[in-house]
Image (cartoon, helix red, strand yellow):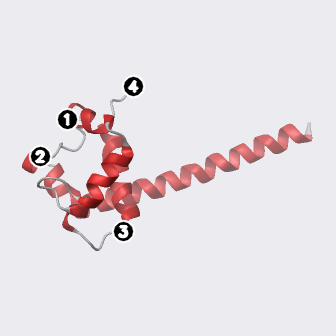
Amino acid sequence: MQRTTLIKASLLSTCVLFSAATIADDEAGKKTYDDACKVCHEAGIAGSPKFGDAEAWAPRIATGLEALYTTSLNGKGAMPAKGGRADISDENVKAAVDYMVKNASPKL
């Protein structure tokens, strides 16, 4: 009985920590999106997929997160590396990618 309680408590604390980390990542992603990505992705400038447009994002998401991270960090086509903001950390760029992908994924 004690072992089951310990396992449940451990799982609960892991879920709480994961949720807190996810919220922090979402906040960092949104902030980075607002600071560096929004200017193009909100309007679809230069062919960028619009924020929240699942259809436009689908083929990009299909390439995988690592490919999206690489493109965002290094630039591609009209998009400069890190959205033209060299001062933003790689982790925050990745958080912005995660934020955009999450908001472009079809809601089930």
Write down the residue under mark 2.
44
Task: Tell me which numbered mark, 3 or 1, is placed earlier along the sequence.
Answer: 1
In this rendering, would 35 be left or right of 42?
right
**Outermost bottom residue:** 87
Q: Are marks 2 and 4 in contact (CB under 8 Å)?
A: no
Q: Are marks 2 and 1 in contact (CB under 8 Å)?
A: yes
Task: Tell me which numbered mark, 1 or 4, is placed earlier along the sequence.
Answer: 1
Q: Nearer the viewer, mark 2 or mark 3?
A: 3
Hey, what amino acid is under mark 3? Answer: Ser
Question: Is residue 96 positioned above or below 85 on the image?
Answer: above
Question: Residue 85's image quarter?
Answer: bottom left
Q: Nearer the viewer, mark 4 or mark 3?
A: 3
In this rendering, would 26 be left or right of 73?
right
**Outermost right residue:** 1
The image's mark for residue 89 is: 3
Write down the residue under mark 4.
108
Hey, what amino acid is under mark 2? Answer: Gly
- Residue at screen point 13% across, 52% down: 77
Looking at the rendered structure, the secondary structure element under dot 1 is helix
Q: Distance between the Cα atoms at labels 2 and 3?
A: 24 Å
